[in-house]
Image (cartoon, grey):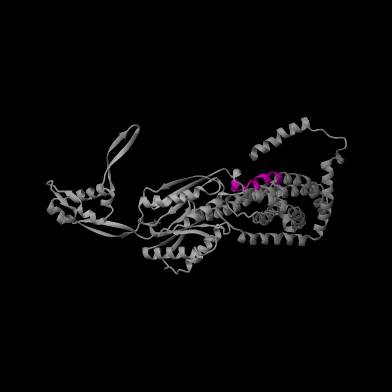
Amino acid sequence: AICMSMFVSFSLTPMLCARFLKTPEKREDSGPNLATRMIQKPYEHLLKLTLKLRILVLALCGLSVLWGGHLLKEIGKEFMADEDEASYSLNVTMPRGWSIHRTSETLKPIEEELGKLKGVKGVITTVDSADITQATLQIQMIPYKERKPFTQFESRKQAQEIINRYPLLTALSSDPDIQLKIQGDDPEVLKEAGEKMVASLSQKPGFRSVSSSAKGAQPSVTVRVDRLKAADLGVSPETAGEAVQILIGGLKVSTFMEGDRTYDVYLQLPPHQRDVPKDLQKIYVSSSSGTPVALSRVASITEGTEPAKIERYNRRRVVTLEADLDKSLSQDRGLSETKAELKTLNLPPSYGVEDTGSGDLMKKTATYAFEAFVLSVILMYMVLASQFENLLDPILILCTLPLAIPFALFSLELAGMTLNLFSVLGLFLLFGIVKKNAILQIDRTNQLLDQGMEMDKAIITANTERLRPILMTTITLVVAMIPPALVGPTGATQSPMAVVILGGQSLCLLLTLLLIPAASSYVDQVKNIGEWKIWSKFRKSQV
């Protein structure tokens, strides 16, 4: 897009200007020029004062950078901001051992209550076929413009409060804010750590629906075939296992059609005969001679408990800790509080904690963004050094970049937003805009110096002349960023980017207009040092 824009500015724009622009008779008194002169005069006086108080201006810029470092530590951080998509889902966990019937009966009144929430259009419930104690509630809402200012985040919070009122149930969003894996070797230690974390975090403000994967063991019935007895009676272990699997689990043996509907036919014991473990002793299996043999004669049947699932991460046993956060607590602070609470458990040294989910993505994004920023600064310096044909002017231009950070972060704080993936992208765009203004100022200053103008006069003249294009581009950009900045919850991914550009550019503009003139005079003194003159002569001789 930028390359195409440059091509248009070199070709189409001059052609259109030559065709349509007219020079008015009294251009000097026209509105835009009059407004520009009204701004240029005070700015010219401010520039003269800046050159007298250069150290004060540079100190003010330095304090702004330090303020930015403080804001960077204090501002909330997350991977991505939640966006109102008029739809959200909740994962509901029931106690281990519940039947599909009990799960269904428990969810019915919950569905009815959720359907009565403001803005809810419908609720779809799905029970996990592999684990009937896990269910997903998909809540559909009417468009945001029809329920303003009620957001889906408020609706989700109300839905979680409704579900959590039911004993033994927990409701988490499909993408929880906190997701940590506690790694270790002893399942009992992991289970105890998970239970303690759930109990402690549930009492902390900002945490909602804290859960651990270390659930209580589920009831189980174990059938162990005695191979010696089975061999004596002519019963193979495979036959005994298949009989139990078919009669308890069921086997599809046929289909039945009635009108235009088709029904599956299963071979299975009736519920009252398969729900009592002792009734398994009454099952008969066929021997090799065709004689029926009671299952109790060839196998032992014991009742007990066993874990519902065994979790491993990087080949180690783990317990997954998950939690949702209120808007009052950012993701990075929630992670910090969770890890601080984990340290109080005094787990063995061999145990560890691994970030997963969006928390892990947030850390990776921060690392990649920092690496990209360093690389972009290096590339910008190389390009600017080749364009200006010296090594000092690019440094002066790049010194304007840190000034954009504090005002961009301050804008996010004022808007109640966080530093996330899209606001970081906005920072990169802001760096390019701020750098462009500095290039305009320094390039014009160098042109006037080459014409033999004295340094202070060249600085004042160049910056005064470049004030109008800088203001024009800044105002155009700021106005263009207002609509996406005010789009609301439905544009939560684009709003941070717009706020960063809008606030950062408009607030740091004045400091940028003063920093370049103040620093330019010092750079000129460095250029006049003997060693620098020698280097410049050497460079010119190589050309």
Q: In the depicted view, which residue is nearer to us: 108 or 373?
A: 108
Which of 36/257 is in front?
A: 257
Is 153 colored magenta in this rendering? no
Q: Which is the main secondary structure of the residues drawn in magenta? A: helix
The residue depicted at 72 percent of the width and 56 percent of the height is 532
Locate the N terminus by quadrant: top right
Q: Is residue 31 left or right of residue 354?
A: right
Left or right: where does residue 354 sit relative to residue 129?
A: right
Residue 447 lies, with reference to residue 226, above or below; the image says above
- Give residue 83's position: percent from left, percent from top: 57, 48
Residue 204 percent location from the top left of the image: 52, 64
Residue 412 x %, y %: 64, 54
The part of the chain drawn in magenta is 478-494
The residue sitting at 68% across, 38% down in the picture is 6
Q: How many marks?
A: 0
**Residue at left offset 79%, top offset 33%:** 21
Q: From this viewpoint, is residue 355 visible?
A: no
Taking the spot 16% from the left edge, 53% from the top edge, the residue there is 230
In the displayed structure, does residue 355 sit left or right of residue 215?
right
Q: Quadrant of residue 218?
A: bottom left
Q: Is residue 250 visible?
A: yes
Foreground residue, 152 or 529? Answer: 152
x and y percentages locating residue 525 in the rendered image: 77, 58
State yes or no: residue 479 in magenta: yes
